[in-house]
Image: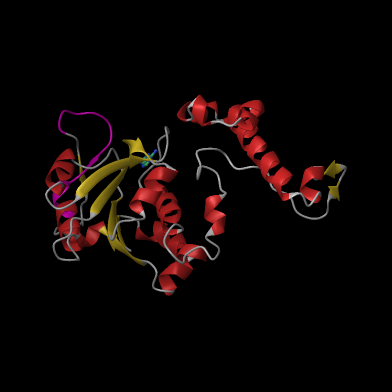
Amino acid sequence: MRIDVVSIFPEYLAPLELSLIGKARQDGLLELNVHDLRTFTTDKHRTVDDTPYGGGAGMVMKPEPWAQALESVAGVREGTKPVLIVPSPAGERFTQALAYELAEEEQLVFACGRYEGIDERVIDWAQEHFTVRPVSLGDYVLNGGEVAVLAMVEAIGRLLPGVVGNPESLVEESHSDGLLEYPVYTKPSSWRDHEVPPVLLSGNHGKIAQWRRHEQFRRTAERRPDLLDNFDAGQLSRADRNAL
Ligand code: ADE
């Protein structure tokens, strides 16, 4: 996969050189380029923003530097229309399902807005060259798209083949099956008067699997009952229902 990120703060994306994603880049599993929006301006002051039409607080990002930047990264592979992700609190919600969907793409472009946002005409114009998807990390407001891009690239990048050493670990994690993950423990079995649940020491794999499933439902019901709306009652085993 190839990822291009356009930002006025390219240094913000430096953590993508670290850890699993950094290693994936070194290993050639992921090609990631960060572009400074200001290099696509033409004036002496390298201006990227201006006052909003209609008045109001704050500044709006000017359209032309964005068009120049996006044209330079679009259609890197002839005949393809890359997905352009515009992080925004006004976008569709980023979920594990969307991470899986985006991990199938050949090229992703991220446009990090700042200030009050990007002139809306950029979004309209970009539809000719990209599949445009405004995406929100959650119902809160960040200062710009960069932190959202760090989260999204990490969530997508770890799903690419070969990035996570043991692909089994992607199967039993929160949200992979629509539920939160079960609690985990390691040695020692007794620690500061807190014990590991005895079933995990039993060696009975059937019972352990049953206990873990039960804990997934119990946790989800307690912390994220909204997720259980996606399960229809007919899908649940008796053991699942008992956990609720
Ligand atoms: N930019 C500002 N707030 C954001 C959010 N919640 N998600 C994605 N991008 C953002």
Question: Which x, y percent locates residue 244?
Answer: 63, 26
Using residue 25 as the reference point, say whether residue 106 is left or right of it.
Answer: left
| Residue ID at (50%, 38%) | 178
Residue 32 x %, y %: 34, 65
Which of the 4 image quadrants contains residue 96?
Answer: top left
**Is residue 29 depicted above or below 40 in this figure?**
below
Res 139 quadrant in image: top left
Position of residue 209 relative to residue 22, above or below, is above
Q: Dividing the picture into quarters, in which one does residue 140 lie?
A: top left
Q: Is residue 228 visible?
A: yes
- The outermost residue toward the bottom is 27
Majority SS type along the magenta span: loop
Say which of 44 and 34 sits in front.
34
Along the line of sight, the residue nearer the viewer: 44 or 64? 64
Expressed as whole percent of the image width and height from the top left, the position of residue 26 reads: 43, 74
Residue that appears at 62% across and 37% down:
216
| Figure quarter occupied by ligand 1 | top left
Boundaries of the magenta span: 53-65
Is 153 magenta? The answer is: no
Q: Residue at x 16, y 45 (%)?
A: 122
